[in-house]
Amino acid sequence: MPKLIKDGKLQENPWKTLEQDRLDDAELSSGNYLVPLDAWLALPPAERETIGLWIGGDTNPSALSSALAKAPAIAIRFAGFADGRGFSLARILREDCDFGGELQAAGNFMQDQLFYLKRCGFNAFDIADDADIDAMLVSLQDFSNSYQASHDEPRPLFRRR
């Protein structure tokens, strides 16, 4: 079963990601599913509170709204480790859309990015089967202090003295 690091702890990933072409085959009420953003927005409001969604790093930030605040989980898929748009989308979801649920990094991100992903608001990481999980858990604590303000510490270092 796929693994997930959530809030600094390893667990089995309860979410099943569905692509647009597989939505007709799924009984969404029978499990924890992540569906594409457009499909999630088309759901009745009551169902949105039990079904999560996924977005790509290329999602237009204007497509994100406060309606997403009710989702139980949002996964941002990284197409490549050099694509930083997912970092910005995470900040927008946390700060502008008031999203307080599980924000999951999925796809092609690197262990070296975990600390920074966490600072942008991610609290869950979809882990590849061959990943060194112990090293990834350590990477979440790579630095003891950060100079800049971010989601996890809104005050810059000079304000914390």
Image (cartoon, grey):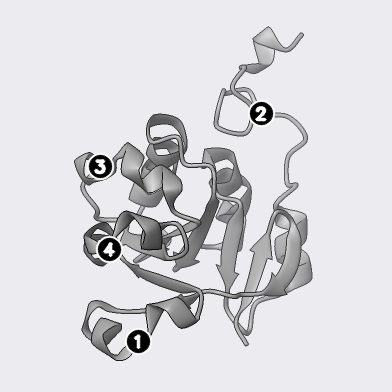
Q: What is the distance, in whole Å, between disc 3 and disc 2 at their CAs?
A: 26 Å
Q: Is residue 146 visible?
A: yes
Q: What is the distance, in whole Å, between disc 4 and disc 2 at their CAs?
A: 40 Å
Q: Quadrant of residue 114?
A: bottom right
Q: Crowdedness of circle 2 by 10 Å Cα count: few (<14), some, many (20+)?
A: few
Q: Crowdedness of circle 3 by 10 Å Cα count: few (<14), some, many (20+)?
A: few
Q: Earlier in the sequence, mark 2 or mark 1?
A: 1
Q: What is the distance, in whole Å, between disc 2 and disc 1 at their CAs?
A: 44 Å
Q: Crowdedness of circle 1 by 10 Å Cα count: few (<14), some, many (20+)?
A: few
Q: Residue at x 60, y 58 (%)?
A: 124
Q: What is the distance, in whole Å, between disc 1 and disc 4 at their CAs?
A: 14 Å
Q: Quadrant of residue 158?
A: top right
Mark 3, residue position: 61
Mark 4, residue position: 43
Mark 2, residue position: 146
Q: Where, quadrant-wise, is the N terminus in this rendering?
A: bottom right
Residue 49 appears at what percent x and percent y?
Answer: 45, 57
Q: Earlier in the sequence, mark 1 or mark 4?
A: 1
